[in-house]
Image: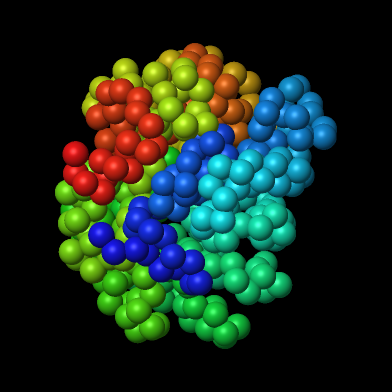
Amino acid sequence: MKSLKIGKYEIAKPIIQGGMGLGISWDKLSGNVSLEGGLGVISAVGTGYYQNKKFSHKNIQDKPYSEENFYSKDALFEIIKNARAICGDAPLAINALYASNDYGRTVKEACEAGIDIVITGAGIPTNMPEFTKDYPDVALIPIVSSARALSLICRKWKKHGKIPDAVIVEGPLSGGHQGFNYEQCSQEEYQLENIILPVIEEAKKWGNIPVIAAGGIWDKNDIDKFLNLGCSGIQMATRFIGTFECDASEEFKNVLLKASKDDIQLFKSPVGLPARGVRTNLQTMIENKTAPKVACISNCVAPCKKGIEAKAVGYCIADRLSAAYNGDVETGLFFTGTNGYRLDKLISVKELMKNLINGE
């Protein structure tokens, strides 16, 4: 496999580890992926929970209060520093959700902390370059689900003298929030192999922007498939949950190890998009209206409207993701891609990367 060039950075192995919040891909996972020649990605979501809220300076009801503490600057700096201690000067990325209530601040702080690459999804980040203009070496990667979205981003960015350094195309088999509605997630025309080719053609119009495939990619056969279609690399997330170095709790990992194919479903989310994860006791509680009471403490994402949408769907996403991160199998929300049921044991990041490259 050829290396992956993103801006001034060269990724020895064309594998990006998808950003997983809350707390699933922080310093240990991202640092080790970059150490092994891939691109480790730190999730910027919920950093206030890092090290038992050590860096969240104000907590109410044992939750980080307001977006200032939910997206903790001090925690983000510590996570990046600790990941750097593992991977050294190897390229390191952050994933910041465009829907987050402190997107611009988070991106600026990641750049200040020395991040190399910023990846953004959960919306169309038309103004992404504004927040990195003082850091010209930082590479920018939007996540899209169509050629139309890439065209819009390029046209907006071009006015400011910038085009994406790469683009990630995410299909509807990924874990967490989807860029499609419920019907589209199962329709053939929206599957990754069908939406990727128009994006590759659009990318060529703007100077051969590297295209990275994501969503449902599992092994070397999948990687080879998308590289042969013309992609420069791939992104995968779920397989990295099945590693010793993944920052998730052991309870979180065990939920996936025990999950069956039928357990992995699409759920309603306060963000307003379908979200894929493992059906657990939480979904039964939501249906029976016995789920933990919604109280918007952290104000994490704009589409939730300070808890209005959370109350409508029956749960607070920040609270339930943090419960999963902390190992609460009764009330936690456990995101995974469609292939999560295929995890059957934990291995090291080193072994996983070797398997992905060699097909073992």
Q: How many marks?
A: 0
Relative to residue 13, is residue 94 drawn left or right? right
Q: Residue furthest right?
A: 58
In this view, the residue in front, 61 or 27, is 27
x and y percent of residue 136 in the render? 63, 74
Residue 267 sits in quarter: top left
Name the colouring of the figure: rainbow
- The residue drawn where x is 57% and y is 22% is 326
Is residue 350 visible from the viewing direction of this image? yes
Q: Is residue 270 visible?
A: no
Specify the quadrant of the image occupied by residue 276: top left
Residue 151 on image: x %, y %: 41, 76
Residue 22 left/right relative to 143 = right
Residue at 53% over, 66% down: 140
232 to the left or right of 8:
left
> For the point 19% across and 65% down, which residue is it?
229
User: Closest to the observer: 332 or 220?
Assistant: 220
Q: Is residue 149 above or below residue 359?
A: below
Residue 66: horizontal and vertical position, in percent?
76, 40
Q: Quadrant of the C terminus?
A: top left
69 in relation to 11, above or below: above
> x, y percentage for residue 198?
26, 71
